[in-house]
Amino acid sequence: MSNTTFVTILSLCILLLAACQQATETKSEAPKPDMAKIKAEIKAVEDAWAAASNAKDVATIVGFYADDAISMIDDQPMLVGKAAIQKTIEEEMAKHKDKATVVFETLDLYGDENRVTEVGKTTVTDSTQKVIYTGKYMAVWEKRNGKWLTIRDMSNDDAKEAPVK
């Protein structure tokens, strides 16, 4: 191999390595999502959801779901689409005649500007502020047309206390 060939190959290798390094640096410099801002946006939606739930406003609650949403709740088959979700919400609200207040608390949130997963807990109290039950949930939110919508959710209640004998 001549010195000229060797220098040419070596120069090409150095250029290739430099290009790879620059591409890696450019990738790592992508802005990170403002998770505090996103968490505040999700909290605002959750607060509006709780208010709608407390008012038994089914239409508003269903509006927080995407048309293609899937919901998986305690003791129910998988609910696919808004119509199935709405029917179940209506049935559940009809069962609960008493005045109960629900509060959602976001425990963890991760993702990006377009899709996040939320882990949270639910507390339901009666009119005297006595806790009726608690639960937990996971929700996958997607931003569509500037609005956060639930595309998947799963929830269940915590164990009920055993009756005192």
Image (cartoon, rainbow, N blue to C red):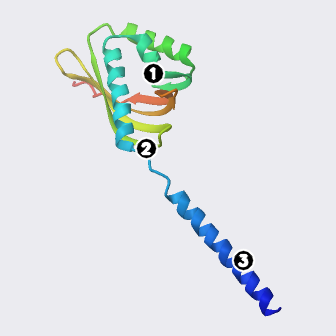
Which of 51/6 is in front?
6
Which circle's residue, 3 or 2, is located before the other in the chain?
3
Give the alpha-carbon distance from disc 3 to disc 1, as whole Å. Answer: 55 Å
Q: How many marks?
A: 3
Residue at (47% x, 43% y) in the render: 111
Q: Closer to the observer: label 3 or label 1?
A: 3
Quarter of the picture containing the N terminus is bottom right
- The residue singled out by tag 1 in the image is 64
Q: Picture coordinates of residue 5 (x, y %)?
A: 80, 86
| Any part of residue 159 in sight | no
Where is 99 relative to 138, above or below?
Answer: above
- The residue singled out by tag 3 in the image is 12
Q: Disc 2 marks which amino acid?
A: Tyr
Residue lying farthest left?
Answer: 128
- The residue singled out by tag 2 in the image is 110
Q: Disc 3 marks which amino acid?
A: Leu
Give the alpha-carbon distance from disc 3 to disc 2, as whole Å. Answer: 42 Å
Give the alpha-carbon distance from disc 1 to disc 2, as whole Å. Answer: 19 Å
Which of 28/110 is in front?
28
Q: Picture coordinates of residue 154 (x, y %)?
A: 47, 30
| Any part of residue 144 in sight | yes
Q: Picture coordinates of residue 150 (x, y %)?
A: 48, 27
Q: Residues within 10 Å of mark 2 (few under 14, many from 20)?
A: some
Badges 3 and 2: C-beta atoms under 8 Å apart? no
Which circle's residue, 1 or 2, is located before the other in the chain?
1
Residue lying farthest front?
Answer: 4
Residue at (33% x, 35% y) in the render: 40
Which of 7/80 is in front?
7
Helix, strand or loop at disc 1? Answer: loop
Helix, strand or loop at disc 2? Answer: strand
Horizontal relation, residue 91 to residue 70: left or right = left
